[in-house]
Image (cartoon, helix red, strand yellow):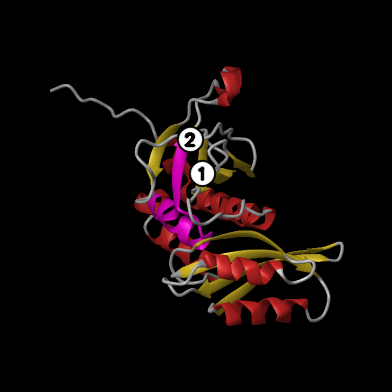
Amino acid sequence: MLLRVRVTLPDRPGTLGQVARTLGVSGADIVQVVVLERLGGRAVDDFTVVWPGAARVERLLAGLAAIPGVRVDGVWRAIGAPTTTGQDAELLAQVAANPADGLATLVDAVPGLLAADWAVAAVVPVDWASRTGGGGATVGHASWRAPVPLRLPEVTPLRGRSMTTPDGTHHAIAPFGRAGLVLVVARDRSETLSAAAFHSTEVDRLTQLVRACAVILGDRLDLVGAPPVTVNP
């Protein structure tokens, strides 16, 4: 299976090589490395690896924990092949080519881009600020892996951000900037694996995608979640 492994490590020569060797010895085949952050002598890296399904992840975690200064922030299943920013452009091209299904295209594609489990386009009511916790969002479109029934976090349409709900589900939220529409992406809690929260660079990437789609789709977004019009015979 394909796994995403997030590691915080000292930003000094040799440490990345130690992590890579440990992953290899543990049985992981590295297919991609993405540097999320380098700050204050520390780095945060995402490794996408092919992991033998029968092997125990505890072996991998123990090997990484033995490297001085290394901390494992999360290990979780990744959907699809490793992604690059080039795929963001391809997604936007698909949205532009078929704007009638543009929102659905975005919602269905984003989980694969961000190694998430599911996504929904949610409509936040106009009076969200006066409601307790700012809740009351309704689903405009959900990806195929979204749970049923779906319980959304308390979202607001103001800014992109990440959050973790009490049940351990990690969310990234980005507003479209119109019609109270927001995109919510989630990594579910697992009994065997522990996903990392969405990093600020992932939230920024999601926010840029959503803003670009808002420009492409324009007034079509105002119709999301609108009640159907009944025509009397």
The quarter holding residue 75 reads bottom right
At numbered mark 2, what does the secondary structure look like: helix, strand or loop?
loop
At numbered mark 1, what does the secondary structure look like: helix, strand or loop?
strand
Q: What residue lies at 57% left-to-right and 39% top-to-bottom?
A: 177
Distance between the alpha carbons at the discs numbered 2 and 1: 8 Å
Q: What residue lies at 48% left-to-right and 25% top-to-bottom?
A: 136
Along the line of sight, which residue is nearer the eye, 93 or 121? 121
Q: Is 114 included in the stretch rendered in magenta?
A: yes
Along the line of sight, which residue is nearer the eye, 169 or 103? 169
Q: In the image, is residue 9 above or below residue 107?
A: below
Q: In the image, is residue 21 above or below residue 197?
A: below
Query: At which x and y percent is residue 189?
Result: 50, 48
Along the line of sight, which residue is nearer the eye, 76 or 185? 76
Label tally: 2
Give the foreground label among 2 and 1: 2
- The residue pinned by badge 1 equals 184
Q: In the image, is residue 208 above or below residue 126?
A: below
Query: At which x and y percent is residue 28?
Result: 54, 77
Q: Is any part of residue 200 visible from this angle?
A: yes
Q: What residue lies at 53% left-to-right and 38% top-to-bottom?
A: 167
The quarter of the image holding the N terminus is: bottom left
Amino acid tagged 2: Leu
Q: Is any part of residue 85 visible from this angle?
A: no
Q: Residues within 10 Å of mark 2 (few under 14, many from 20)?
A: some
Query: At which x and y percent is residue 222?
Result: 44, 36
Q: Are marks 2 and 1 in contact (CB under 8 Å)?
A: yes
The residue furthest left is: 233
Query: At which x and y percent is residue 233?
Result: 12, 23
Amino acid tagged 1: Val
Task: Tell me the magenta residue range.
Answer: 104-122
- The residue pinned by badge 2 equals 152
